[in-house]
Every structure is written in C-alpha cells, then in structure tokens.
Amino acid sequence: MSVDLATVKRVARLARLAVSEEEAQKMVGELNGILGFVEQLSEVDVKGVEPMTSVTPMVMRKRADVVNDGDKAADIIANAPATTENFFMVPKVVE
C-alpha cells in the first residue's frame, strides 16, 4: 500500500490540520516509509511466540475477593424517612 498526495491532503483535512503543499509532499514520503515498515513486520514469522502485556514478566496485584457489607448501612439509611433493620420502608403500592 502506498500513500499519494491526494490521500495526505484528505487525511489532513479530515484531521482539521493545516498542511502546506511542501509539508504534504514531505508527509507522502514519511507515511510511505512507515507503511513499508509495517509491511515488513507483517512478514515476520511469530508462530509459537506468546503475546506479551509487558516487557518484563509481571504478576498483577489483586485485592482479595471478600464479600462484606461495606460497613455503610447506617450511612445509607441515615436520610431515609422510615427504616427497619437497615432496610428502607416504603408504603404498600400493590393491592
């Protein structure tokens, strides 16, 4: 794949970048170089290579998965008009 001057100008317009004719000509060469490098990378055989999430092996730190009530029940129901045993009380709506 190669990039031409019209493509560079179109992308610049879509990105709302002001690009002069000289800059656009320079970008054609730069973008074609980048795309050439990406094409080289796609030719590399990576069979048997595991994907990495980091350059160095790391273990993700995780907190213990413990179920608790958060000790916030009193704060949650503090402004409720009516409560019983840490539950909201509402008027009956179904007859």
Image (tube, helix red, strand yellow):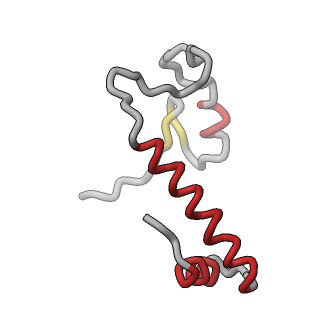
Question: Where is residue 80 drawn, in percent x and y?
Answer: 60, 47
- Residue closest to the eye, 27 or 56: 27
Q: Looking at the image, which is closer to me, 51 or 67?
A: 51
Count of residue discs: 0
Q: Quadrant of residue 55?
A: top right
Residue at point 34% right, 21% down?
48
Q: Does residue 18 appear left or right of residue 95 in this picture?
A: right
Asked where in the image residue 33 lies, by quadrant, the reply is bottom right
Q: Residue at x 70, y 72 (%)?
A: 26
Residue 30 horizontal side relative to residue 68, left or right: right
* Residue 94 in the image, given as x and y percentages of width and height: 27, 57
Closest to the observer, 10 or 65: 10
At a point 65% along the width and 63% down the height, the residue shown is: 30
Give the percent coordinates (x, y) of residue 68. Answer: 52, 19
What quarter of the picture does the C terminus occupy? bottom left
Q: Position of residue 52 (x, y in %)?
A: 49, 26
Residue 49 vertical placement versus 27 (above, below): above
Above/below status of 27 relative to 17? above
Question: Nearest the camera: 19 or 92?
Answer: 19
Q: Quadrant of the N terminus?
A: bottom left
Instruction: Determine the residue positioned at 50% across, 49% down.
Output: 38
Q: Is residue 21 left or right of residue 69?
A: right
